[in-house]
Amino acid sequence: MEEITQQEPALSAIDSLHEALDQENIELARDVIGSLHPSEIADVIESMPGYERDNLWQLIDSELEGDVLSHMQDSVRTEFLEQMHPDRLADATKNLDADDVADILQDLPEDVADTVLRSMDEQNLQRLSSILTYAEDTAGGLMNIDVVSVRADVTLDTVARYIRLLGSIPEKTDNLMVVDRDNHYLGVLPLTELLVRDPQSTIGVWMEEESYLSANTPKTEVAKLFEQRDLLSAAVIDEEGRLLGRITIDDVVDVIQEAAEQAVRSMAGLGEDDMFSPVFVTTKRRAIWLGINLLTAFLAAWVIGRFEDTIHELVALAVLMPVVAGMGGIAGSQTLTIAIRGIALGQIVKTNIKPLLKKELTVGILNGVLWSSVVAGIVLLWFDDPSLGLIIGVSMLINLVIAAFAGAMIPLILKRYGIDPAVAGGVILTTVTDVVGFMTFLGLATIFLIT
Amino acid sequence: MEEITQQEPALSAIDSLHEALDQENIELARDVIGSLHPSEIADVIESMPGYERDNLWQLIDSELEGDVLSHMQDSVRTEFLEQMHPDRLADATKNLDADDVADILQDLPEDVADTVLRSMDEQNLQRLSSILTYAEDTAGGLMNIDVVSVRADVTLDTVARYIRLLGSIPEKTDNLMVVDRDNHYLGVLPLTELLVRDPQSTIGVWMEEESYLSANTPKTEVAKLFEQRDLLSAAVIDEEGRLLGRITIDDVVDVIQEAAEQAVRSMAGLGEDDMFSPVFVTTKRRAIWLGINLLTAFLAAWVIGRFEDTIHELVALAVLMPVVAGMGGIAGSQTLTIAIRGIALGQIVKTNIKPLLKKELTVGILNGVLWSSVVAGIVLLWFDDPSLGLIIGVSMLINLVIAAFAGAMIPLILKRYGIDPAVAGGVILTTVTDVVGFMTFLGLATIFLIT
């Protein structure tokens, strides 16, 4: 029994493990590991650089290996799977839930996966194959098939006796699934009903309707349903309405956590990188993002280049131009974030795009007027040049309004073309606010200030 | 029973609702609302501008009002609570879980909260008061007190008869809590054991140790424990080890979702804004962020201003300087994101800061060398000036390495001073990469290019 308080015991465990490994105090390290939950061991491994990871892995109780693997982030897991002997891998996966094994198998090279599959017994194979039929990111890929299903016309007492005979119920079972003769899903019988209702009544009387999922529902939709309906589990059915398995909330929590991680990562162009991915893998992933951004930086530079003569005549323009472009970028990314989240949560639909756009433009104008005036005032004092102040104020106002418009529209347009707005939105927005910012500021200056 | 498929039925419901309200077709709107779950109604309300929200609210079945309120995002809920009559509010909260009522009460002005409290019956009041003792963002604030607790020395059969007498078990009960004579928490008895074990055996035999939480554990730690241990529920205890209540996974899912939302929002300086917060509220919140960023923009401008003479002599510098600063910002924010997430997930500890820093610096140098060479080449071709190419290459390399260092260290330093790195990290990083970028590029140019 372990109490979790503010002292962050998991953190100190990581620290003492690192220290034990540094001092090559294997006994101490083994003790610390022994006190951790498999998911915490996975966390610790992820927080270690590559060379330490392998040392730690050697110290893990072989019975826990599968469990630890199933809690690892994909990129780290793949690293371990690639070096493991297929037989050892088959051993490690023996005690895992079928959905976890399916996850792991999908990360393996085909020949290794085959070896693992061949080492399994009939029942596990059968379970796996029905999960592997569906893509990893669908309800079918998430489900487990350890379902207790019952018929509507039997009595509660019969079911109770049946369960007692089974001797155990699959973990995290809150509902029994009610099916007809042909395994068509009808509804659920909450386990608690077995405890409180008249044993002689039939299941049909107490059966409840409950949300269910078709096997090819995308996992983001699965997460949404669980969240909205406060479900602990939900049935998964095939196209004919036959019961295939069930999804439990603990797997959905992982989906939610993953989606949140990905939203943050994709905005910085990080892909699936973990903290200690090999240096060359990380370098390559990030290099691509830097390259894309370099293109847009040169586009902006090219725009400035059109105004070399103007800048030569009035160098103050070069001093101030990053202010105009930068403020546009900040304001635009505020709108962009709202729009991207709104799309991700399904809250932006055809009919509320107009009011959203109207609101964002109004906010853009109000903040534009406010901060343009402030900037104009500062520039007036700094350079003692009223026309320069006026020009920077006007161009900033224009850029902030266009930024609001672009921030709202870019994700909508990207989504229509099937591009993830969280990945591409920021780069495109910055390009717009840079180009518009430099162009209006330097352009207006060329027209009105240069004689 | 409702099937969730890729057709996103919730979305089309939002659309048809908007349309029905637009056409003032109240009957249709009422029908659509009737088909939705309270959490979906809350979603729809959040996706509507203010004037439509009130219209929709009028159409909601008064029995569902409390449920809908409990599913709303804080900022939207406060908006409704402020206009509701206390009596109606008291009515609406009658059927809610105590933890949801506690949430709502904490959003209310004190006098209104008093009225609601006074309208409650004794039992509910007692339940509420024990939750309200603890801060909203702790285990105590999250918990519910509808716990079924039993003693270790009674038989399963006695418990089964007791439950049958109660006639119902609180929703989402997976475990009965085992306590001693003085209500000290001892462990749990999974409900399923009641169904499979010998009725004449005592609870003590089948009791399991299970993770529990002290009431003042922060909710982020609560979420972490649930995630790591795949829990459905956990006991909450006071300092003396006495059982206070339990937390269920559905409330934890909300915590996880909220934390993810907040991570994304705080990076853009959005605060608690929702999509259709009143224009002036939104404008004010964002204005603060823009103001902070304006300060850093002017700091960068001031740095450029130190080099006016240099730029006057070589205007190409003004054309290229945003490239140096911008690429530093992008590279730095990649490292920053990794570090912020690592801190949030508790994966960065004292002993792995050094390898992390080493890795990030190595990646910074590698990508620095790669992209500096590319930029130097492009500049050589564009301006036909080898020394300018060399200078931009060197300053970009310096900026990318410093960006990696700053991206890793800024969140660590901010955290030490108790500042949320997700909020302040980006602004500070950009300030560093802008200042360093402009200073090295223009500085080196002044020294080596200007005669």
Image: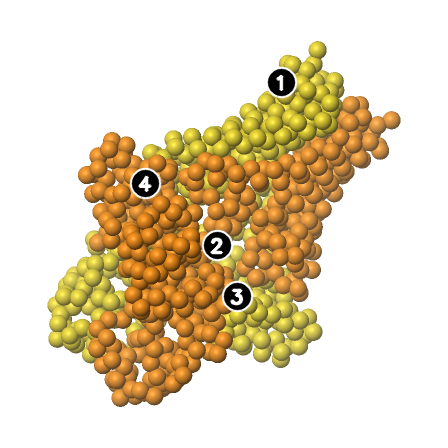
Chain colours: A orange, B yellow
Q: Are marks 3 and 4 in contact (CB under 8 Å)?
A: no
The circle on residue B42 is 3
Label 4 crowd (10 A; few <14 / some 14-19 / many >=20) = few
Q: Tell me the quarter of the image containing the C terminus of chain B.
A: top right
Task: Choose between B106 and A42: the one closer to the eye.
Answer: A42
Label 2 crowd (10 A; few <14 / some 14-19 / many >=20) = some
Taking the spot 29% from the left edge, 44% from the top edge, the residue there is: A57
Q: CA distance from mark 1 to mark 2?
A: 44 Å
Residue at image mark 2: A259
1 and 3 marks on the same chain: yes
Residue B437, picture quadrant? top right
Q: Secondary structure at mark 4?
A: helix
Q: In this picture, is B388 found above or below A144? A: above
Q: State how many labels appear.
A: 4
**Amino acid at the residue labelled 2:** Ala
Whether residue A450 is visible, yes or no, is: yes
Instruction: Give the image location of residue B331, x and y in percent.
Output: 55, 35
